[in-house]
Image (spheres, rainbow, N blue to C red):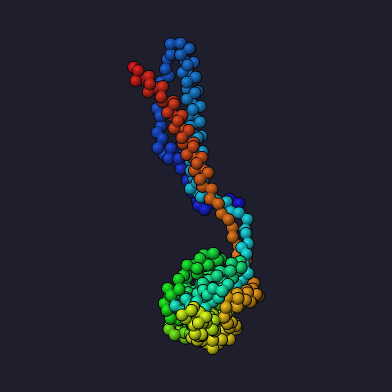
Amino acid sequence: MIDWLWPWAFAALPLPWLVRRLTSRRTLQQPALVVPSMEDFSAITTMQHKQGAQSLWRLMALSLAWALLLAAVARPQFTGEPVNLPTTGRDLMLAVDISGSMATEDMEIDGEYVERLTVVKAVIANFAEARVGDRIGLVLFGTNAYLQAPLTFDVKSVNRLLIEAPVGIAGGKTAIGDAIGLAVKRLRLRPQDDKVLILLTDGANNVGEVEPRIAAELAARDNIRIYTIGVGAEEMRMPGLLGRISGRTTNPSADLDEETLQAIADATGGQYFRAKDPRALMEIYALIDQLEPVEQEAEIFRPVQTLYYWPLGGCLLLWILVLLADFRRHRPASTGAANA
C-alpha cells in the first residue's frame, strides 16, 4: 500500500496555470501580412505548425515535470504487510557485581583457576543468547550502580557491553541496594507480572544510599521477582613456595552475605542460588531459563520504504530533456548570427 505523508502538496498543482493567467497580457491584433506568393505563405504556415507542435510537447513535458515534483514533495512511501516480532513477554534485568573482589581467581576450569568475572561473563552471555524475544537490560554495580544497557531486544549489544566491562570500573565496594533500586526504577513502568531481576554478587552490601532489604520491598510492590546468586568458591588454596599445593587454604567467599541475598529473594517471590564453581553457575542460569513466560501483547512492525526519489528522478529527467530541446532549437540561429 502506498501512502502520502504530505498529500496537501498536490494543492499546488494548478499554480503554474494561475501564474500564467495572471501575468499574461492581451496581445494586439496585427494586420495581416501581404506575401508576394503562395509559396512563401506555405513555408510560413509549415513553420508555424512545427513551432506549435514543439510548444505543445514542451508544455506537456513541463506540466508532467511539475506534477512529478509535487509527487516527490508529497513523500510517497510503501507500507508493507504487518510483521509480528517474536516476544515471550518477559522483561529481564541483569545486575552484575563488577567490584574488585570479582577478580578473585577461585573458579577452576580444566585445572586452571580464572577470575570470577570471566566465568560470569561467559555464562551470562550464553544465557542471554537463548532469551530470544525477551527484553534484556544490564546494570553494573560496585561502589556505584550504573545502567549499562536499557531493556532491549538487542541481546548482542548487551553481551558486548558486559564483556567489555573491566573489573573494578564501578568501584571496589558493593552497593547491592543501589543496584536493585536502579533496576526497579527501570522495570516498574513495564506491564505487570512479567518483570524479573537476576542479581549476581560475591560480597555484602557495604556502601550505597539504599538498604538491600528496603529495595527488595520496593521491588515486591511493583511485582518484580528477584533471583539472587552468590558466586565464589568456599575453599581456595593460596599459592605457596611450591605453588598452590604448598599454600594455605582460605575461604574466598567469607564476605558473602547469603542471609541478605536469601531475604531479598524471599521478599519478592524469587529464589536464592549459590554458585561455587562454573558448573553450578551454568546450572543455576539453566534453571532460571525454565521460568514460565507471561503472555504479552505481540509487537507489530510494518516495514516502510520511501519512494520519493522515483518521481524526483523523473522530474529531473524531463527538465534535462526540455533544456536539451531548447538548446538544439536555438543553436542554428546563434550559429547563423555568428557567421553573419
Q: In the picture, which quadrant includes the C terminus?
A: top left
Residue 252 to residue 319: above or below: below
At horizontal 49% and vertical 36% (from top left) the residue drawn is 318
Q: Position of residue 290 (x, y in %)?
A: 65, 75
Which one is in front, 147 or 338?
147
Q: Position of residue 147 (x, y in %)?
A: 47, 72
Which one is in front, 139 or 91?
139
- How many numbered circles are shown? 0
At horizontal 60% and vertical 76% (from top left) the residue drawn is 279
Q: Position of residue 39 (x, y in %)?
A: 48, 12
**Is residue 328 at least partly visible in the picture?**
yes
At horizontal 47% and vertical 46% (from top left) the residue drawn is 12
Residue 71 to residue 266: above or below: above
- Considering every residue shown, the one lying at the far top of the view is 37
At horizontal 52% and vertical 43% (from top left) the residue drawn is 311
Quarter of the image where one finds residue 292: bottom right
Q: Position of residue 32 (x, y in %)?
A: 43, 19
Which one is in front, 11 or 202?
202
**Is residue 261 at least partly visible in the picture?**
no
Left or right, 13 with respect to 86, comes to left
- Considering every residue shown, the one lying at the far front of the view is 242
Quarter of the image where one finds residue 192: bottom right
Residue 274 to residue 316: above or below: below
